[in-house]
Amino acid sequence: MSNLRRADVARLAALARIDMSDDDLDRLSGQIDAIVDAVALVSEVANEDVPATSHPIPMSNVHRVDEVRPSLAPADALAAAPEAEDGRFRVPRILGEEA
Amino acid sequence: MTDWTNPAEATRASALEMSDALRAGAITSVALVQAHLDRIAAVDAAVHAFLHINTDDALATAAGVDADRAAGVGLPLLAGVPIAIKDILVTKGMPTTAGSKILEGWMPPYDATVTTKVRAARMPILGKTNMDEFAMGSSTEHSAYGATHNPWDLDRIPGGSGGGSAASLAAWEAPLAIGSDTGGSIRQPAAVTGTVGVKPTYGGVSRYGAIALASSLDQLGPCARTVADAAALHEVMGGHDVMDATSLDEPVPSCLDAVRDGATHGLKGVRVGVVKELSGEGYQAGVKQRFEEALDHLRAAGAEIVEVSCPSFQYAMGAYYVILPSEASSNLAKFDSVRFGLRVERDTIEKTMSATRAEGFGDEVKRRLVLGTYALSAGYRDAYYGSAQKVRTLIQRDFTAAFEKADVLVSPTTPTTPFKLGERIDDPLAMYLNDVATIPANLAGIPGMSLPAGLAPEDGLPVGFQLLAPAHEDARLYRIGAALEKALVAEWGGALVSKAPELEETR
C-alpha cells in the first residue's frame, strides 16, 4: 500500500508545522515512504475480532487529592520564554496580512 | 581489596562497595565525587558521554553527606554515591535539552520526580548524559550535540537512545546512571557497552518531569555495572507518584532481596522460556554462542529451559513505528517557540512555529513527526494507528501464553554487537532493527533487563542477555539476573566491563 509522494510529505510537514526546503524533501521523502511500507503490514493481522490496546496497563479514573499545593511562580514560568511582556508570553501576530 | 586512596581504583568499585566504603569511613563522598569528576575530565573529550557537568552542586551535595555522616546523622543506602542523569529528565539548576537544539540552554523551573528522589537519596549528580534527540534513535548519532563513543571501541556506537548513560558506566565516569526506555533505550545501550540496564514495569517509576516521547511506551529505569547496583537504584527510583496518572499504586519491588535470593539459592524450579522468534536469521554467530552458553549456566544453576513461541512478534516493529511516531507527534507539539526553547522569528506565529521547528529538530525527529502526522490523519488512522493498537493486543496475548509455560523469557538483547558510528545513519530501517528484541516488552508494558553475556569471539565486543518477566514481577529479573551474573563473573574472574580496553587519559 502507501505510497507517500513528495507532495504528500510536504503537506504532512506543513500540518506538523515543520518548514521543509526542497533539499529536505529530496532527502526525507524516500526514507519516510520506505518506513511507511515497512510498517504497513500491521493491517494484515488486525481483524475486527481483535480489540485495541491503548495503554499496556489499563487504569481509569485516576485522581489525586484535591488540595492546594505550591505551583510554579509566574516569574519562573516566564523565565525561559523567548519573549515575555506584562507577565505574559509574547508571540508574533496570529493573523497574516491576508486575513 | 580496593585501595580507596587510589582514585583509579575507587572509580572501578561497584556502587554498593562505594556505599560500604563511605559508611566505613574508608573514603569521603567529596573524594569519591572528585575522583569521578577527574575521570570525566580525563576521558570525556573522547567518549562524550556528558552534555553538562554539574561540578559545584555535586561537590556541595557530597560535602553535606560527609558532614552529616561525621555528625552521626542516619543516611540512605546510596548517600554520597555519585550518579549521572540522562538529559531527558528535568533538573532544576542544570540545563536540560533532551539532545535537541530546540532546547539548547533551557533551564527547567522544576525537578522531575526521579530527580527529587535522587536528591532525597543524597546522591551527588555528576551531570546530564547524552542521548539521541528526544530519545529517537539507537546510537546517539541523532543527538544534536554529537555522538557518544563506545568505551570498548571509540569508533563504535554506544547504543541509544541512552548511549551517554551506558558509556559513562563503561568508561568509569559514573557508577550509576538513570535511563529511559521506550523501545530498548536502556537495554540496548547496556548490551553494547557490557553493562546492566533495567526497564521496569510500565508505571513502576514516575515519569513526572521526564520529557515525553511516546507516553504509552516510555519508562524510566536504572543503569549500572552490576545487577545488585541496578537493584539498589531501582528501589530509589520506584514507587507511586500522584503527579503521574499512569504511576502504579503499589509497593516498590524488593529488588535487593531478590538479588540476594538469586545469588544464594540458585534457580531450582525456575522455568526459563527461550523465545523462538528472537533468534536465528540476522543474529550474529558470537551473539548466539554467548546466549547459548548463558543458557547452560542457567541450567547448571537448576533452571529448566523451555522453548516458547510468540508468533505476533513479527508485527511488533511495525506496530511500534506507528504508535511511537503518532504519540510523539502529539507530545512534541509543545515545542512551539512560545513558552521555552528556540524561536526563529517570522511575521506570524504560524510561520514562526514552522521555522523554529525546522531549525530546532534534526532529521530523525522530522521523519517521525511526519510519519506520526500521517498515521493519525483522517482516512488513515484506522489502517495505521488502529491496527497497531490491535497488534499490541496480540503481542500481549503472546506474552500471556508464554508466561504460562515459563517464569521468565530470554533472548539476546540485540542481534549484533555494536556497529561502527556512521554505518547506519542514513538507513533508518537498518537502524530500527537494533531494537527488534526489546520493543515487544514496551508494547506489552512488561519489565525487562539486559546484562552482559560475554564478548563475541569474532570481534571481542560485548553481547547482552535479555530477561523479560510478567508485569509487576520486576523482582524476578533481579533474582534470575543475579544468579546468571554470579556464574558468569566466576567464569570471567571479574565483571565483564573490567575487560574493556584502557582509555587514554588526557587533561
Image (cartoon, coloured by chain):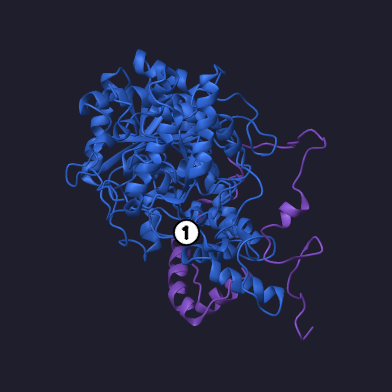
The percent position of residue B457, horizontal first and vertical second, equals 17, 42
Numbered circles on residues, count: 1
Residue A32 lies, with reference to residue B416, above or below; the image says below
Q: Residue at x 51, y 20 (%)?
A: B70
Question: Closest to the observer: B221 or B386?
Answer: B221
Q: Is residue B23 something that shows in the picture?
A: yes
Left or right of A71 on screen, residue B216: left
> How many other residues sit within 10 Å of disc 1, few (<14), some (14-19) or many (≥20)?
some
Residue B333 lies, with reference to residue B113, above or below; the image says below
The percent position of residue B375, horizontal first and vertical second, equals 58, 62
Query: What is the quadrant of residue B237 in the picture?
Result: top right
Left or right of B451 on screen, residue B489: left
* SS under mark 1: helix
Query: What is the chain letter for disc 1?
Result: A
Chain painted blue: B
Chain painted purple: A
Q: Residue at x 37, y 16 (%)?
A: B269
Question: Closest to the observer: B453 or B118?
Answer: B118
The percent position of residue B26, horizontal first and vertical second, equals 38, 21
Question: Closest to the observer: B296 or B188?
Answer: B188
Tell me the quarter of the image containing the C terminus of chain A. Answer: bottom right
The percent position of residue B476, horizontal first and vertical second, equals 45, 24
Instruction: Please state which amino acid type lies under the numbered disc 1.
Output: Val
Q: Residue at x 24, y 48 (%)?
A: B504
Question: Closest to the observer: B332 or B289?
Answer: B332
Left or right of B460 on screen, residue B414: right
Q: Residue at x 82, y 37 (%)?
A: A68
Q: Is residue B275 something that shows in the picture?
A: no
| Residue carrying label 1 | A39
Q: Hey, which residue is sitting farthest left in the picture?
A: B458
Query: What is the quadrant of residue B68 in the picture?
Result: top right
